[in-house]
């Protein structure tokens, strides 16, 4: 079991170190405006990549049709400026209904 | 910040908490029914606190991949939190305690929530409200799942796996509408991430997406 403890510790310490990069550098290094602009853009790029891979893939392969179809319903609702609650529940309900109807 | 804004913030965050709570329950249940003792998913959720990395690490462990492979996989998935922590560094708050605690709450969800707000005061409130709530609900869910075992059944039935991508759509859409440079970068990044997904370990695709920033364009000084 000590191997599991070591694994959890390594994962915890490493992850916290990644998360400290921003707060530690902040206020010590004066980042040029262009770099700050790129960091903001990088966060959006990462989030869009997470949403694309999260919607379409699972375990390195295609996630099936029900999930991306549900996310698409959510995206259309968001585009039409529907409230946040409607967007998220719309996506989940659409996916659940498709699965209940036999779409994988 | 007006009360109405704060109510809206809590209402929107609560949906994300709910979805994370259910995912937490399934994480706890999967870990325990796979043969791990109850404390493993519970302690992991408190100190690592990163859903996808926890699932991957436990997945590797249960598949017999060993602790080294499990921690490397999890760390690879979490490298993106370094980029996120840089993006939110100025909204955590001025004090040392706020920064040290806030760093632990840097997740995909809280960063997306914070960056979607229009001004610094609301960004800070969104980060802390969504972050503290998420931490509480996620860990409660994992504990409940670990104690209940596999009583929940298949969460896919409820379509909750579509909820988080939809949350991200709603939160990044304003930034994408605003800036064509960000739009171009994000489209290229997502395409690259999808293209490499079948060929590389989990966690690498979203990092590859950062190459999309080449389309962000250099703004030349006049």
Image (cartoon, coloured by chain):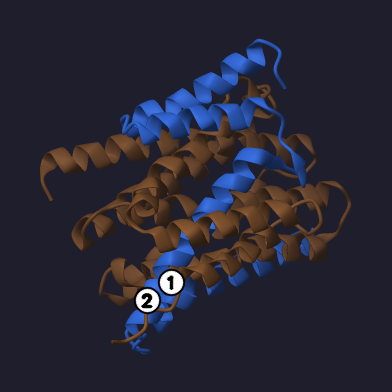
Near-viewer residue (A5 or B191): B191
- According to the picture, the residue beneath numbered tag 1 turns out to be A39
Q: Chain of mark 2?
A: A
Residue at the disc numbered 2: A36
Q: Nearer the viewer, residue B185 or B166?
A: B185
Please identify the residue farthest to the front as the structure is shown: B222
Q: CB under 8 Å between callouts 2 and 1?
A: yes
Q: Where residue A27 sits: x, y (%)?
A: 32, 85
Of the chain colours in the picture, the one used for chain A is blue
* Quadrant housing residue A30: bottom left
Disc 2/disc 1 C-alpha distance (Å): 5 Å
Mark 2 vs mark 1: tell me if same chain.
yes
**Which chain identifier belongs to the brown chain?**
B
The reply to whether residue B98 is visible in this rendering is yes
- On the question of residue B132 being in view, the answer is no
The single residue placed furthest to the top in the displayed view is A101
The residue drawn where x is 43% and y is 75% is A22
Q: Position of residue B113 (x, y in %)?
A: 36, 50
């Amino acid at each position: 079991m000590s191997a599991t403890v070591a694994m959890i510790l390594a994962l915890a310490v490493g992850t916290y170190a990644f998360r400290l990069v921003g707060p530690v550098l902040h206020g010590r290094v004066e980042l040029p405006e262009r770099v700050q602009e790129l960091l903001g853009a990088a966060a959006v790029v990462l989030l869009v990549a997470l949403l694309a891979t999260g919607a379409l893939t699972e375990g390195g392969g295609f996630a099936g049709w029900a999930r991306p179809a549900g996310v698409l319903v959510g995206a259309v609702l968001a585009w039409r400026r529907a409230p946040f609650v409607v967007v998220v529940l719309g996506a989940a309900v659409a996916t659940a209904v498709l699965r209940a109807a036999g779409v994988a | 910040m007006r009360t109405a804004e704060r109510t809206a913030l809590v209402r929107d965050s609560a949906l994300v908490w709910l979805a994370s709570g259910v995912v937490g329950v399934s994480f706890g249940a999967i870990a325990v029914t796979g043969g791990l003792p109850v404390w493993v998913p519970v302690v992991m959720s408190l100190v690592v606190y990163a859903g996808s990395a926890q699932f991957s690490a436990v997945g590797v462990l249960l598949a017999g991949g060993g602790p080294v492979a499990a921690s490397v996989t999890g760390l690879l998935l979490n490298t993106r939190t370094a980029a996120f922590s840089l993006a939110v560094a100025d909204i955590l708050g001025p004090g040392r305690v706020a920064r040290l605690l806030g760093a632990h709450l840097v997740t995909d969800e809280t960063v997306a929530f914070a960056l979607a707000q229009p001004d610094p005061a609301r960004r800070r409130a969104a980060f802390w409200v969504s972050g503290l709530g998420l931490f509480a609900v996620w860990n409660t869910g994992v504990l409940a799942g670990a104690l209940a075992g596999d009583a929940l059944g298949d969460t896919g039935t409820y379509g909750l796996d579509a909820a988080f991508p939809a949350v991200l759509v709603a939160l990044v859409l304003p930034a994408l509408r605003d800036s064509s440079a960000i739009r171009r970068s994000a489209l290229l990044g997502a395409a690259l991430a999808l293209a490499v997904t079948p060929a590389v370990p989990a966690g690498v695709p979203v990092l590859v997406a950062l190459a999309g920033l080449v389309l962000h364009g250099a703004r030349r000084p006049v």
